[in-house]
Image: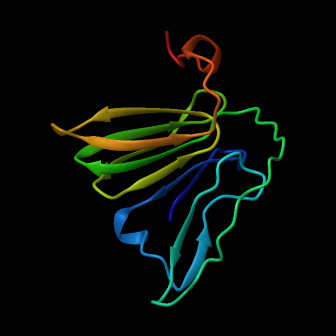
């Protein structure tokens, strides 16, 4: 699981290739407790029970939008940028890959027809004008 960090050591993103996302027994978290989005893989044998539960209403304050993309079909070229808009990583994502975007910037180019991915991020979404800005005008 390559962590993508800035020159200053800030964790910007985590790319989990499909072949690396096979969980070992138990739970493996890819996010820190303080991240606004949480990502983990889970693997258990038959009979493992997760007791039914409901989450408390807890007020949280998020100052960044953090995202997880799960590539279901196709391929995309990913570019990851630090907080100073400098590209720090570029790689191809393929079917089954997951990327968790925590800080800095990012951009993607679709490489194959019918590319499909899921996007999960914290909300509420306040609209493009409030929620994001283009790195390069």
The x, y position of residue 41, in whole percent, is 52, 69
The x, y position of residue 14, in whole percent, is 54, 54
The x, y position of residue 84, in whole percent, is 65, 28
**Where, by quadrant of the figure, is residue 53 drawn?**
bottom right
Of the pair 10 and 25, the residue shown nearer to us: 25
- Look at 47% across and 89% down and name the residue there: 45
Q: How many marks?
A: 0
- Look at 70% across and 47% down and name the residue there: 10
- Look at 42% across and 75% down and name the residue there: 22
Of the pair 118 and 135, the residue shown nearer to us: 118
Q: In this view, does 120 lie to the left or right of 37?
A: left
Furthest residue to the left?
A: 113
- Look at 47% across and 50% down and name the residue there: 99
**61 shown above or below 126:** below
Of the pair 46 and 73, the residue shown nearer to us: 46
How is the structure coloured here?
Answer: rainbow
**Where, by quadrant of the figure, is residue 52 drawn?**
bottom right
The x, y position of residue 95, in whole percent, is 28, 55
**25 shown above or below 36:** below
**107 shown above or below 102:** above
Q: Is residue 60 left or right of residue 13?
A: right
């Amino acid at each position: 699981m390559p962590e993508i960090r800035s020159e200053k050591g800030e964790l910007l993103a985590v790319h989990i290739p499909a072949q690396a996302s096979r969980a070992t027994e138990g739970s493996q978290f890819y996010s820190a407790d303080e991240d606004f989005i949480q990502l983990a893989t889970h693997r258990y044998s038959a009979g493992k029970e997760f007791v039914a539960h409901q989450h408390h209403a807890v007020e949280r304050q998020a100052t960044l939008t953090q995202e997880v993309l799960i590539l279901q079909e196709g391929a995309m070229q990913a570019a990851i940028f630090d907080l100073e808009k400098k590209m720090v990583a570029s790689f191809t994502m393929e079917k089954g890959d997951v990327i968790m975007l925590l800080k800095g910037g990012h951009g993607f180019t679709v490489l194959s027809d019918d590319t499909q991915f899921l996007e999960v991020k914290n909300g509420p979404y306040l609209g493009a004008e409030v929620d994001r800005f283009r790195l390069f005008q």
